[in-house]
Amino acid sequence: MTEKTDLLRHLREETFIRLQPSGIHGTGVFAIRDIPAGSDNFFSDSEDEWIHLTYSDVGSLPTSSQFLIETYCLFDHLGYFVPAHGFEKMDLSLFLNHSDTPNIASVNDGESFVALRQIHAGEELLVDYGTIVQE
C-alpha cells in the first residue's frame, strides 16, 4: 500500500475526534463518530515521552510556560506530566477538558486513554484531571 492509501484508510476508519469550541472551557475534543465503551484507539499513537515536573519545577518557569502546563497537562499530587518536546507540537489529548463525571480515563499517566462508556458523535470527551488508571 502507498502512504496515500494508508492515510485515506486511516481518515475513513480510524479518525474519531476533532477539536472545536467547548461550552466547558475554550477548546475541547469532540467525537466525530461513536466511540464504543472500552475503546482506547481514538487518539493517535504518540511516540512522545512525558516528563514529570514537580510543582516547584513549574513554579520556577516563566509565567507563559506555567500557563501552558497548568492549562494543558495532566497532574498528580506531586506535579505535572509535560510532553518532552514542550509545546512545539500539540497532542489533541492536551485539549481534554475536566469533568467530575468523565467519559474517558487517563491510563498510565496520560500514556493512553480509554472510553468509560459509549461516547456518541458530537459529544465532548471529558477526563477527570485528578484520576489516572494504572495498567
Image (tube, grey):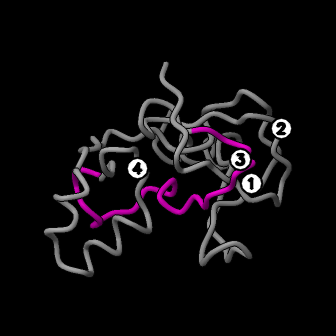
- Mark nearest the camera among 2 and 3 is 3
Q: State the mark number for residue 31.
A: 1
Residue 80 covered by magenta stretch: no
Up-down relation of residue 101 to residue 24 (above or below): above
For disc 4, the marked residue is 75
Q: Residues within 10 Å of mark 4 (few under 14, many from 20)?
A: many
Splitting the image into 4 quarters, where does residue 25 fall?
A: bottom right
Local secondary structure at mark 2 = loop
**Percent of width and height locating residue 49:** 27, 41
Mark with earlier residue (4, 2): 4
Splitting the image into 4 quarters, where does residue 52 fall?
A: top left
Which residue type carries mark 2?
Gln
Q: CA distance from mark 1 to mark 4?
A: 24 Å
Residue 91 covered by magenta stretch: yes
Q: CA distance from mark 3 to mark 1?
A: 14 Å
Residue under the point 30% across and 53% down: 82
- Mark nearest the camera among 3 and 1 is 3
Up-down relation of residue 16 to residue 96 (above or below): above
- Mark nearest the camera among 1 and 2 is 2
Local secondary structure at mark 1 = strand
Q: Is residue 100 left or right of residue 66?
A: right
Mark with earlier residue (3, 1): 1
Is the C-beta separation of discs 3 and 4 under 8 Å?
no
Front residue of 65/114: it is 65
Which residue type carries mark 3?
Pro
For disc 2, the marked residue is 118
Q: Is residue 105 left or right of residue 111?
A: right
